[in-house]
Image (cartoon, rainbow, N blue to C red):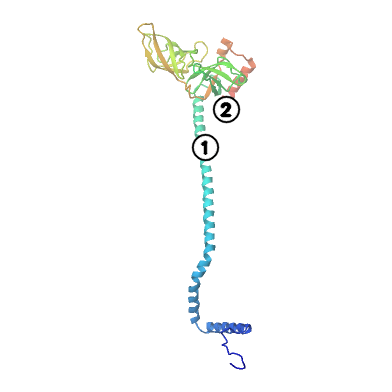
């Protein structure tokens, strides 16, 4: 101790602020010089980088975690959206496929329907089923053609397979058809095989028919095809009506019980042809229309034929 002041080392409490700056500058210059002159400083930097690498990794973890989470949620959201879009497309394509099947089936039925009548001989008008009668004891239906198109009472109705029935009432836009399966409906028929003529009456079921007044010794067999005979003027000749499915002899009476199945698909068809027969119209005076309306109906049928 000199003059009452203690002698303390320079670095115990540190130099004054100016000395600190000077010391840092000298050390930095020395390190730069050593780094420039000697290569062993590269090893020092490598070791220092190795030591601080875990710290750098820990510091970068939050940013990397946030980036990973963002990418994961973004990818998941994208997959969810893509999945939803694909499901919507699947439903749409499935609906289109179903519609295509329906249209294809309808097209096939219409093509078969157009082949059901000789178009160069009998004018016709296409019609579609609108409603069936709910009464199980009445076999009737309503189609979407009426007086505006020239439909008349008594007009024959067929589908792609055979005779369906006759029009019994007409409004301006629709018509009511009595089907051949109704018990009150009868059709004059003949057997294709031998020409025998009978009357087929509805059995009340969707396709069941009964051949009336068949003698026990009549030449009629299972599988015989019955077609319209043209008698009575209601139906043109030669259209399929039914096929015989059962012949039961009656030993206690003169007539056998003969059952037949309708050729027309009465419980499945939706498209029909309404046939125009001038002879039947003139003979029975069944048209509640004037001649101008009837001629218009024939023109409609002729245009349809020309379009086909």
Helix, strand or loop at mark 2: helix
- Quadrant showing the C terminus: top right
Crowd tier of the residue under label 2, counting other residues whose Cα lies within 10 Å: few below 14, some 14–19, many 20 or above: few
Crowd tier of the residue under label 1, counting other residues whose Cα lies within 10 Å: few below 14, some 14–19, many 20 or above: few
Where is 81 relative to 254, above or below? below
In the current view of this chain or complex, which residue is farthest to the bottom? 2
Earlier-in-chain disc, 2 versus 1: 1
- Quadrant showing the N terminus: bottom right
Q: Position of residue 273 (x, y in %)?
A: 53, 22
Q: Which residue is mark 2?
A: 307
Relative to 73, 195 lies left or right? left
The answer to which quarter of the image holds residue 26 is: bottom right
Where is 59 relative to 229, above or below? below
Q: Position of residue 115 (x, y in %)?
A: 49, 24
Q: Residue at x 51, y 42 (%)?
A: 90
Helix, strand or loop at mark 1: helix
Q: Which residue is mark 1?
A: 95
């Amino acid at each position: 101790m000199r003059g009452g002041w203690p002698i303390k080392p320079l670095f115990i409490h540190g130099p004054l602020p100016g000395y600190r700056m000077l010391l840092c500058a000298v050390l930095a210059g020395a390190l730069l010089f050593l780094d420039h002159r000697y290569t062993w400083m590269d090893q020092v930097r490598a070791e220092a980088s190795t030591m601080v690498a875990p710290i750098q990794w820990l510091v970068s973890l939050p940013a990397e975690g946030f980036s990973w989470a963002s990418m994961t949620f973004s990818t998941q959201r994208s997959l969810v959206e893509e999945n939803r879009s694909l499901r919507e497309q699947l439903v749409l394509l499935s609906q289109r496929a179903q519609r295509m099947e329906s249209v294809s089936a309808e097209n096939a039925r219409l093509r078969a329907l157009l082949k059901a009548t000789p178009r160069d001989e009998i004018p016709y008008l296409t019609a579609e089923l609108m409603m069936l009668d709910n009464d199980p004891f009445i076999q009737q239906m309503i189609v979407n053609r009426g007086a505006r198109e020239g439909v008349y009472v008594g007009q024959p109705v067929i589908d792609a397979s055979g005779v369906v029935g006759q029009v019994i009432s007409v409004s301006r836009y629709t018509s009511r058809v009595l089907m051949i399966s109704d018990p009150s409906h009868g059709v004059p028929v003949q057997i294709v095989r031998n020409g025998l003529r009978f009357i087929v009456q509805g059995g009340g079921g969707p396709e069941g028919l009964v051949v009336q007044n068949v003698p026990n010794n009549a030449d009629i067999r299972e599988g015989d095809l019955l077609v319209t005979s043209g008698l009575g003027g209601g139906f043109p000749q030669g259209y399929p009506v039914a096929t015989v499915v059962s012949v039961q002899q009656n030993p206690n009476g003169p007539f056998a019980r003969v059952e037949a199945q309708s050729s027309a698909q009465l419980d499945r068809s939706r498209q029909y042809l309404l046939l125009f027969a001038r002879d039947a119209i003139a003979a029975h005076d069944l048209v509640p229309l004037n001649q101008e309306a009837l001629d218009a109906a024939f023109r409609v049928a002729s245009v349809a034929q020309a379009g086909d």
